[in-house]
Amino acid sequence: MAEEFVSVHEFNLLKEEVQTIKQEMAENQKLLQVIDKKIDVIFEKISNADKTDELKLQPITARVAKLEENQSWLAKTVAGTIIAIIIKIIFEFANGGI
């Protein structure tokens, strides 16, 4: 098996390439850390916006529920009044007309 040797010049070129790759990796790591911090800030802002929207919607939701309940009572009252008027008309006809 023949052994291959690397010349000093080739070794120095490889050493420079490795050093360049290490520097690029360090720069990439710094960039990734900056991106991570920005993502955390964006996530926090989104979370706060969701909480703010929820707090804004709670009173509106309560008011809508109250209005729906009032509308239900109004419909029941109108239906009861109509039924009472119909019963009154029936009794008047039964007792001798209008």
Image (cartoon, rainbow, N blue to C red):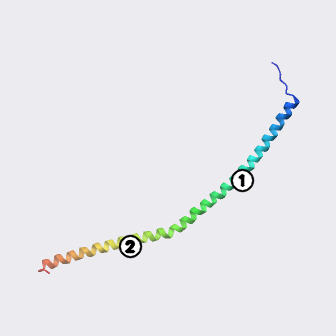
Residue at label 2?
A: 70
Q: What is the secondary structure assignment of the residue under circle 2?
A: helix
The residue carrying pointer 1 sits among few (fewer than 14), some (14 to 19) or many (20 or more) residues within 10 Å by Cα, namely few
What amino acid is labelled 2 in the image? Answer: Asn
Left or right of 70? Residue 94 is left
Q: Residue at x 35, y 70 (%)?
A: 72
| Amino acid type at mark 1 | Val
Give the quarter of the figure containing the N terminus. top right
- Residue 25, position in %: x, y? 76, 44
Which residue occupies the extreme right position in the image?
8
Query: Is residue 30 depicted above or below 93 in this figure?
Result: above
Label 1: which residue? 34
Q: Is residue 37 left or right of residue 21?
A: left
Q: Residues within 10 Å of mark 2 (few under 14, many from 20)?
A: few
* Front residue (pair 18, 77): 18
Is 19 above or below relative to 67?
Answer: above
Q: Residue at x 51, y 68 (%)?
A: 58
> How far is mark 2 from mark 1, CA to CA?
54 Å
